[in-house]
Image: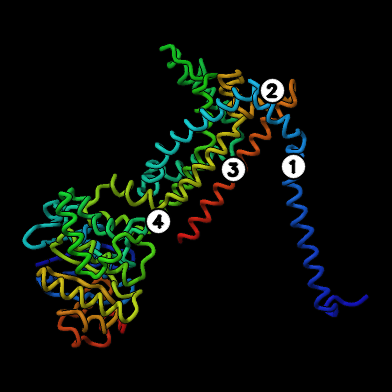
Amino acid sequence: MIPRHLWPKNYRHSITFLAAGIVIAGVTLYLALPVLALLIRIPPGQFIATLQDPGVTSALWLSLFTTCITLVIVILIGTPFAYFHSRYSYPGKVIVDTLIDLPLVLPPAVAGVALLVLYGRVGLLGRYFNMFGIQLAFTTLAVIMAQIFVASPFYLRQAKSLFEQLDPAYEQTARTLGASSLRILTMVTVPMTAGGLVSGAVMTFGRALGEFGATIMFAGNLPGVTQTMPLAVYVEMESNVNVGLTISILLVIISFAIMIAVRLIQKREADRA
Amino acid sequence: MLEAMMVKRLRDYTLDFALSAKPGEVTVLMGVNGSGKSTTLNIIAGLLTPDTASITLNGECLSLTAEGINVPAEDRRIGYVLQNSAVFPHMTVRDNVAFGLRARHIPRPVISERIAYWMEQMHIADLTGVRAGNLSGGQKQRVALARALAIEPGLLMLDEPFTALDADSTQTVKDLTRRVVKDMQIPCIVVTHRVSDSTDIGDRACVICQGKKEWEGIPGEMPEICTVCHCA
């Protein structure tokens, strides 16, 4: 056998090239094939017809409604939170940092159980809400609470990191020019990090839209009230496969749109930089 | 007239520095990296809190720790151009120059008047609608200067204003700075680490090393080697 160092250079390059091609093709196919299988499972005509199914429309609108509310709440509360958190040192900051990341590694079903134990009818806080006739668990509000708990870290982490990376000279200059903290946040800090914030918001939207485990545990699976698209997929796959597949394809399309949006935003940011 | 005395314990040394600057004069603050130049400006601007300080500007007390006085940065009326000019890249040139005036709730007609005046003075009138992020280094520096001067400050401070500029832009910014300081009769402090800058622009020079005043006098008469740490 010819020793490797004596192989012709082109031959060695070809082997590297072939190995790279196999690895790249293998990973790509592994990721793409399930999605392709889903897309070709239902003919386009049937897909469009099934979109009219009440089960689909109800789950779609509920999902979009709750996810939009979740996004608004996360942006309105998360932005100032991330700003103050990145700008000030306070006791227990490391613990807060860990808590922000916790939902990312916590199994969603466990997050749902935790929310139920806290806000359920006989939960730690829920029992007091119940005394005033307020029930949180198994309502549309519970869907939103579960989505916020699970999806907000995507926005919070992004916003925190953007604010930390922003050159302090901009905010310092704004201060010496006479700007208040609110004006600095709204006129300088947020506009200068807007691209990244939008990117974080889109990821949060995507995560909230796909939320399943925490929602089913804390909000249940009531059609029209708490049955979001992922929950509807789960139910319909047992009774009406076509509806389940149609909702799945819808989720794939929305996920693709989200990823394309994120890519475009990142590209625009890179071009601007 | 600026009269400043400050003490602040830093990680490697204690900044213990006194500085005065007369109206219409450019005082050049020199020293190697990490000698305390920018820290001094930040304390005067109110961006850093000193351990002990007595700072007065045109008779107004900005900081007097003995009496617990520390006027916030936003109320000091100091035009401060930080390193890298820090123009807001997402705003137009006009919005950059107007930023301080709007933040101070100055009436609109006055804002328009001052913007027009300072953009003319800094030769940036033709850049009014251009996004500041698209400007060259020299243009950014002139926008930053116009923005700092538009608030009609009682003191102008420039931190390493010539670092990223080519020779032509450097000369333009130096000429403009000298002219407005004379016209407005305000004190001006320029931080630099280049000896040539001090002789070009400075009426007085001050060398700082590890937080202590090493030398003060007329630019050009500066010793070549610092006697504290022997830096050049």
Q: Quadrant of the C terminus of chain B?
A: bottom left
Under mark 4, the amino acid is Leu
- Provide the secondary structure element on which disc 4 rests: loop
- Is disc 2 in the same subunit as disc 4? yes
Name the mark on residue A235: 2
Mark 3 or mark 2: which is in front?
3
Q: Which residue is labeled 3 in the image?
A: A257
Compare marks 3 and 2 and give the one earlier in the sequence.
Answer: 2
Q: Nearer the viewer, residue A264 or A107?
A: A264
Q: CA distance from mark 1 to mark 4?
A: 41 Å
Secondary structure found at label 2: helix
Looking at the picture, how far across and down is residue B161, in whole percent? 28, 72
In percent of width and height, residue A46 lies at 73, 29
Give me the disc on residue A36: 1
Mark 2 or 4, which is nearer the eye?
A: 2
Badge 1 amino acid: Leu
State how far apart marks 3 and 4 are (Cα).
29 Å
N-term mark: 3 or 4 = 4
Task: Pinpoint the chain carrying mark 3.
Answer: A
Earlier sequence position, callout 2 versus callout 1: 1
Say what secondary structure mark 1 lies in: helix
User: Which numbered dot is residue A166?
Assistant: 4
